[in-house]
Image (tube, rainbow, N blue to C red):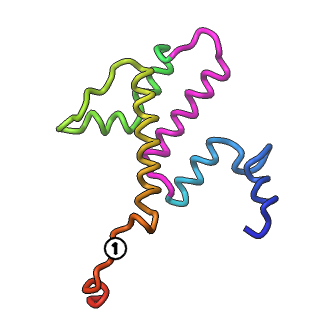
Amino acid sequence: VAVPAFVEELFRGQGGLSSFSAKISICYAVGLMTRGASHDLHIVRKISNDFAHKPHGISFKTKEIADRINRFETLKLLHAEKNKLFPVPTDPRQRFNLVLAILLVNGIEKRIREMPKFQEAKRPDDEAAQ
């Protein structure tokens, strides 16, 4: 980018991308994440805000937090799997941690898959067919 200071301002203070919400939305808008990942990260953001603004009398077992956790798309997909590799935990904190781990691993795997070094090599006969 020609003006690094301009880009830095986007991510600080009142910059357009300073909030977690804006970062999630822009990543989804430009195709860096799926709708499901965006949905789940917005839930993570809301839970984070709940803990930040209500530091006392709140836990992962609090109804409001547990209800948010149950709305994770990732958990719905895991429940829909016919051949489950592992049981989905029932404890809200464990479910939250599982979703974060899956989102993280999926994000890392997507980045690795897109690296030129790991993309499937084209065979000479594939190029001739085009």
Residue 19: x and y, percent?
68, 42
Quadrant where the C terminus sits is bottom left
**Residue 109 appears left or right of 76:** right
Q: Residue 52, relative to residue 113: is it above or below?
A: above
Q: Residues within 10 Å of mark 1 (few under 14, many from 20)?
A: few
Question: Farthest residue in the front direction?
Answer: 117
At 62% from the left and 42% from the top, the residue drawn is 21
Asked whether 116 or 69 is in front, the reply is: 116
Residue most extreme to the top: 57
Placement of 125 over or under 82, stated as above or below: below
Residue 64: % across, % down? 50, 19
Q: Residue at x 54, y 60 (%)?
A: 30
Whether residue 16 sits left or right of residue 130 in the image: it is: right
Kindly report the secondary structure that dominates the magenta region of the rendered protein.
Answer: helix
**Which residue lies under the disc numbered 1?**
121
> Which range of residues does the magenta coloring cover?
32-59
* In-image side of 124 versus 57 (left or right): left
Return the residue found at the far left: 83
| Mark 1 residue type | Ala
Residue 4 colored in magenta in the image? no
Residue positioned 78% across, 61% down in the render: 4
Q: Nearer the viewer, residue 15 or 103?
A: 103
